[in-house]
Structures are given as structure tokens and as C-alpha cells.
Amino acid sequence: MTIATGAPPTRNTPAAVASGFLMGGVIGASPAALVVGAVIENAPLFVLGIVLPAVYGLLFFLAGAPRRAREAAVAPRTALALVESREAVGGEATSDVAVRFELTVAPDDVPAYRRTAQRSRSTSTSSTWPTTGRAASWWPSTRRTGRGG
């Protein structure tokens, strides 16, 4: 079995950086406007502190609508995945433990590749997980999967 590796897609586009700065500004300006508006008894400033996060959330939702529509239009594909290893990562304070799985995914029409998946499960059922075995994996056919393609 040939295993192709590739770099994961990067998300540091200028739009993502601008969105991060805008989110930071909204997170900082909203409580500041609430407090300052209440202290100096300026009703429009106080209302701005309440409305600003709602408007930002609406814009964020509308900006992501085309991407969500594209992903919903593509049917997912199923492939077999071999569980190579599993490792608990965190979960010291609760009974839910995040587990990182190293998988080898073998779709029918492309070369096999390795993938890391992380799932949170209750510790009461963790003893029933196989250390190695087969699992089903699905992904949208047009989405990049980290295989370099």
C-alpha cells in the first residue's frame, strides 16, 4: 500500500488575519462600550455595546454561507481506515477523554494516506475501543484531505 503524505492546508490568508483582528476588536470594544456607556450614562454607546457583537455574528454567518452551501452540495465519500494507534490527550478533570487516533485511510479511487482524528469519549467505554482495526471514514470529495491533492 502506497501512502502519500502532504502538508496540511494553511489558514493564514489575509482574510483570516483580518477576520481575527476584527473579532479581537469586537471582543474588546463591546464590553468597553457597555461599561463606558453605563458610567457616563450615554444610552447610544451602551446600546452599541450590545448590538456590535450581534451585527458581527450576523456578518460572520453570512460570509460563511457560500462555503457551507458548497460543502452541503457535495456528497461525502466513504473509505476504509486502519487504526494505527490511539492516545489519550487531556481529560484529567472529567470522565470525558479526548483521544487522538492515527489512521491510514484507503479510498477506492486515490492512494492511501495517513490522517489524525481526535474524538472525545467517556472513559467508561474506552476499554471497548480496538487498538488496531478497521473503521469507516467519510469526507466531502472536493475538500482537501491533507494528501497534497
Image (spheres, rainbow, N blue to C red):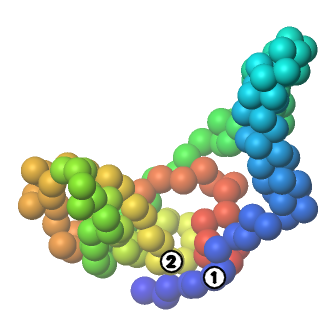
The answer to which of 16 and 130 lies nearer the viewer is 16
Are the residues at dot 2 and dot 1 in contact (C-beta closer than 8 Å)?
A: yes
64 up-or-down from 127: above or below: above
**Residue 52 at what x, y percent from top left?**
82, 27
Q: Which quadrant: the C terminus?
A: bottom right
118 up-or-down from 86: above or below: above
The answer to which of 135 and 29 lies nearer the viewer is 29
Q: Residue at image x 84%, y 15%? A: 41
- Please tell me how crowded label 1 is: few (under 14), some (14-19), or many (20+) other residues with Cα within 10 Å: few
Q: Secondary structure at mark 2?
A: strand
Q: Residue at image x 70%, y 70%? A: 9
Residue 128 occupies quadrant: bottom left
- Visible residue check, residue 112: no
**Residue 92 at what x, y percent from top left?**
24, 61
**Residue 11 at what x, y percent from top left?**
75, 64
Q: CA distance from mark 2 to mark 1?
A: 9 Å
Extreme-bottom residue of the structure: 2
Q: Residue at image x 56%, y 84%? A: 4
- Visible residue check, residue 63: yes
- Residue assigned mark 2: 113
Which residue type carries mark 2? Tyr
Residue 14 occupies quadrant: bottom right
Which residue type carries mark 1? Gly
Q: Secondary structure at mark 1?
A: loop
Q: Which mark is on residue 6? A: 1
Q: Which quadrant: the N terminus?
A: bottom left
